[in-house]
Image: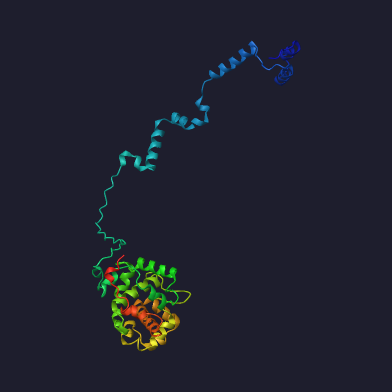
Amino acid sequence: MGIMTQKNKEQQEDPDMTPLQKLRALSKSGITRYEATPEELSNFKAKELAKEEEEYDPLNNRSNENLIDLIEKGANVFDDGVNAFKSWIPFLDADKTTELEPTELEPTELEPINVAIPYVKPVDKQTEILFKPPAIYPNVLDSNEAIHGRLWGRAFHTEAEYDEIKQADYVDDVRQFLVPNSNYVNTMVPILNKVVPAFAGDSGVKGDILYRAMLEIGAHESQGATDLYNRKSHASGVFQTLTSTVRDTAKDSGYYGPKAQELTGKSRQEVANMTAVQIQNWMQTDFTANAVFGAIELIKLAKGLQVRGEGDYLLQLTGTTDETNYNEAII
C-alpha cells in the first residue's frame, strides 16, 4: 500500500473537488488501495437501506398489466377469458366432450403373396420328374461336368479346342448353368425336347449326345440364356448364330427340310427374304428357331471336319469313339 502524503490527503479532503479530480489525485498519490471514510460508509449504507425499504408499486410496473386488469375488473373477466379459451380449444371443455363411435369396416380378404425363392435341386437320377413335359433324355441332366469342350472349341470357334483359358471358361459356365431346375435348364429342356428328335439319326448322330452337347454349348455361348447378342460379331440367340449361317442353312434343303421349317415356322424363301436385323431379332426372341439353326450348324461343321479328315468330331456326336456313360459323369 502506498503512503499518503499530507498534500495528497488535503487534496482528497477538499470538498470542492469533483469525483474525477479526486480520482486523478488518488492515482498520482501512488496509493493502491482506497479506504472510505466513516462518513462515506455511513452515507452508502443509508442509501442501500433506503432502497430496500422502498415499497413495490405494481401499478407502475408494465410487466403486470394483465394482472392489474384482473384485479381492477374482477373475476368476471377471468371467467370470460377461460370460457373464450375453452371455445377456442373445444376438447379442453370437460362439459362438452363428445365420444366418437367406432367406424365399422367390412372385412377384406387379402390375396396370398407368392414369393419366388430361388432353389437349386441337388443333382440326382430323378430329374425327369421336374419337367413338364419330361425330358426325353433325362440322364444327360444328371451331370454338370463339361463333356463336349473339344467339340465346341473346334466346330464353333476352330481355335478354342486347345485354348486352356477358353476351355476353362467353358467348364465354368457348364458347371454354373447346367444344373437341374436352374432357369437355363428349365427354359431349354422343353425346347430341345422338340428340336433334338428332328435331327436324331442324321449322319448317325445320337439324340442323347446331341441333346447334351446343345445344352453345354448354349450354356457357355449365352451365359445361361442371358447374353443373347454379340455386338462385335452380331451373333444372336442362345447358340449365338450368325446371320450368314441362318441364310446359308435355309438354302440347304438337305438340312433345312420340312421338319426344320415346321419348327421355325418359316420356309426357306421366307428366311431368304429377311433382312439382317430381322434375322438377328428372330434368333434372339425365338429360342426354338435358334436351337434349330444351332443344331444344324453343329452337325454340319462336325461332319465337314470329319469328311476332310480333320478330326473325330462327328464321331463324338455318334458315340462311336466316345461311349459316354452319363450316369457316371456326376461331379
> Could you say which is closer to the camera, residue 316 or residue 223?
316
> With respect to residue 295, does 252 lie above or below?
below
Q: Quadrant of residue 206?
A: bottom left
In this image, 57 relative to 212: left or right? right
Where does residue 105 sit, x and y in percent of width and height?
26, 55
> With respect to residue 325, does 246 lie above or below?
below
Where does residue 44 sit, x and y in percent of width and height?
61, 16
Protein image colouring: rainbow
> With respect to residue 327, does 40 lie above or below?
above
Visible residue check, residue 191: no
Visible residue check, residue 277: yes
Q: Quadrant of residue 11?
A: top right
Q: Quadrant of residue 280?
A: bottom left
In this image, 219 relative to 65: left or right? left
The quadrant in which the N terminus is found is top right
> Could you say which is closer to the camera, residue 135 or residue 81?
135
The count of marks equals 0
Where does residue 267 sit, x and y in percent of width and height?
36, 87
> With respect to residue 141, does 86 lie above or below?
above
- At 32% across and 71% down in the image, what residue appears? 187
> Could you say which is closer to the camera, residue 103 or residue 303?
303
The quadrant in which the C terminus is found is bottom left
